[in-house]
Image (cartoon, helix red, strand yellow):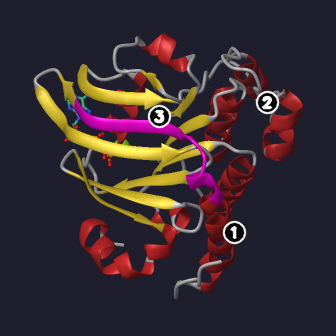
Amino acid sequence: MRKCPRIPASWRLTWERRTKVSTAATETKTALSISGLHAWYGESHILHGVDLKVHQGEVVTLLGRNGAGRTTTLKSILGLVGSRKGSIKVNGIEAIGLPTHQIAHIGIGYCPEERGIFSSLTAEENLLLPPEVQAGGMTIGEIYAMFPNLEERRHSQGSRLSGGEQQMLAMARILRTGAHLLLLDEITEGLAPVIVQTLGRVIGQLKDRGFTIVLVEQNFRFAAPIADRHYVMEHGRIAETFSAAELEAKMDMLHEYLGV
Ligand SMILES: Nc1ncnc2c1ncn2[C@@H]1O[C@H](COP(=O)(O)OP(=O)(O)OP(=O)(O)O)[C@@H](O)[C@H]1O
Ligand SMILES: [Mg+2]
């Protein structure tokens, strides 16, 4: 195994585990391949030729300052922007010309920043809603094993759940669909450290189960130990890309781009 770089001790254990897994991941297929992606909201040209590749089983972050275009990149994959141009291949299938409902069926689970929990339904009803679009969607039992808090709150209305519980529910819901490529937008935003820790543990478990994950994050301390590779966006383009092993050497550059 490669030598672990000088990074905080709390990050190191996870780093070693991730590096081992990521070596295997690079030998497998590409789950998501984006090239020359441009996107617009009406007249506003937001993405200016994004190139990004994620291998099956990898956890990759999309970092950047506010307004860099990270959410727009995720929305473009789903066809949720005004218009888009370029190529977006999901498991080898070209998605750029497909409508959103068909894109959902090629195995993408999207967890939007605003979570989208149905407030008048209970936590469990929210979990029962998503259709299984691909084989392998998690059962309610599997979901509760992964998120014990949700089992405790299963009969509570969506509107009565805390921010952390809503976030866990939003993540759990996409696992019901069978999607194995997960696009997660700022899942730790505004949450207590204990919930952030739970989410980190869940992402580790999902990675071990073979999920491919794109994490849009501001919280670099959360993202760094769990990701195999990082992309940094600026002004609607990918400005930098580097692996977990290169993290230490890139810290100065990250300070400059993100102020971390
Ligand atoms: N619906 C919209 N209509 C017009 N412009 C938008 C829309 N949504 C976002 N933008 C603009 O697109 C740019 C990129 O926004 P985006 O939401 O992708 O950024 P981001 O990297 O996710 O950052 P953050 O989440 O911190 O705002 C910003 O300049 C933003 O103002
Ligand atoms: Mg955003």
Q: How many numbered tags mark residues here? A: 3
Q: Nearer the viewer, residue 21 or 148?
A: 21
The amino acid type of the residue labelled 2 equals Met
User: Which of the image's four quarters has the C terminus?
Assistant: bottom left
Query: Could you say which disc has been placed on residue 114 in the image?
Result: 3
Please provide percent x and percent y for residue 65: 28, 57
From the viewer's perspective, is the residue at label 2 or at label 3 nearer? 2
Residues in magenta, as a range: 24-38
Looking at the rendered structure, the kind of residue marked 1 is: Arg
Identify residue type, mark 3. Glu
Dot 2 falls on a residue whose secondary structure is loop
Dot 1 falls on a residue whose secondary structure is helix
Q: Dot 2: within a 10 Å radius of its alpha carbon, few (fewer than 14), some, or many (20 or more) residues?
A: some
Res. 75 in view:
yes
Quadrant in the rendering for residue 46: top left
Q: Residue at x 36, y 78 (%)?
A: 251
Residue annotated with mark 2: 138
Q: Nearer the viewer, mark 3 or mark 1?
A: 1
Determine the residue positioned at 36% across, 22% down: 80
The residue carrying mark 1 is: 17
Question: Relative to 127, is 101 above or below?
Answer: above
Looking at the picture, tell me which residue is in the foreground, 215 or 119.
Answer: 215
First-in-chain label (1 vs 2) = 1
